[in-house]
Amino acid sequence: MNDQLPLQVSLTEIKNETPSVKTFYFNQEFSFEPGQFVMVWVPGVDEIPMALSSANSITVQKAGDATSAMFDLSAGAMLGIRGPLGKGFTRGEKMLAIAGGVGAAPLLPLARSDSVMTMLLGARTENELLFVDQLDESTDVIIATDDGSLGQRGFVTDLMRDISIAAYDRIAVCGPEPMMRAVLAMIDGLGFASRTEFSLHRYMKCGIGICGSCCIDPDGLRVCRDGPVFSGELLKKSEFGHYTRSASGTKKNI
């Protein structure tokens, strides 16, 4: 299979996960490493990057034109899938995963691979938590919600204070960038930034390292080819947590 050419897939099931998140299952399985992504072509709308939540699914939060159009699709509709692309998470023997909101999607396959000992899972409310039952089958899940509707009231960074970070040889993180920046600050303060990896989301046009639209400052690393997973040590002095760029390249503060 040529991962640079879009493969036409048919949607077999669309599952409502939360009020703003759906999982789209398709009739083609992909061999991938947790954390890799695919470029998803929504006919007549746009092509956007999405992390694989399983070998034959993507989990999508309604946010822009393409995702809004996807939310109007039904089983049997067609999408174009190009990939898998990019670099996934480095596995360890004793892994900690930290997820916020839809950031649980790329971490679900990692947990299912028996690589993760503990998962810290956060969301604004109980209704917005993703994959709680599935993750419970694979790992030890500790939950925080902003409003305290399930688990501890607060953020995943609050949960980090109650565990021994040093007990894990690898740490995988995905979620809203302000959350990930807060995690990096805590991890770096403990001296473990080099064993921690973060999955970044940036605007992408090509997904294969040609257009440069997803390059991050100051080193110009391409999220699509050099990432989307980067070490915390590399991100400490980058734009991470401070700003992203629009389709025109204009900086957008986070």
Image: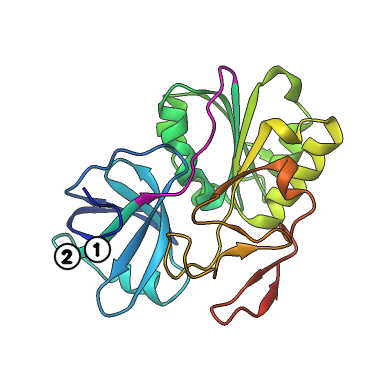
Q: Kindly identify the amino acid type of the residue bearing the numbered disc 2.
A: Ala
Query: Quarter-wise, where is residue 74 in the image?
Result: bottom left
Give percent across and percent down for residue 204: 48, 67
Extent of the magenta region:
84-94
**117 relative to 87, above or below:** above
Which residue does the numbered mark 2 point to in the structure image?
77
User: Could you say which disc has been placed on residue 38 in the image?
Assistant: none
**117 relative to 126, above or below:** above
Disc 1 crowd, CA 10 A, few/some/many (<14, 14-19, 20+): some
SS under mark 2? loop
**Residue 88 painted magenta:** yes
Residue 247 versus residue 226: which sits nearer the camera?
Answer: 226
Q: Residue at x 71, y 42 (%)?
A: 232
Give percent across and percent down for residue 3: 29, 52
Q: Kindly identify the amino acid type of the residue bearing the numbered disc 1.
A: Gly
Q: Main secondary structure of the magenta part?
A: loop
Which residue is situated farthest in the left direction here? Answer: 76
User: In this image, 67 relative to 12: left or right?
Assistant: right
Give percent across and percent down for residue 130: 47, 45
Which residue does the numbered mark 1 point to in the structure image?
80
Q: Residue at x 75, y 56 (%)?
A: 238
Which residue is situated farthest in the right direction here? Answer: 189
User: In this image, 139 relative to 98: left or right?
Assistant: left
Asked whether the viewer can see residue 121, the reply is: no
Disc 2 crowd, CA 10 A, few/some/many (<14, 14-19, 20+): few
Q: Residue at x 57, y 82 (%)?
A: 248
Asked whether the viewer can see residue 76, the reply is: yes
Mark 1 or mark 2: which is in front? Answer: 1
Q: Residue at x 83, y 31 (%)?
A: 191
**Residue 173 painted magenta:** no
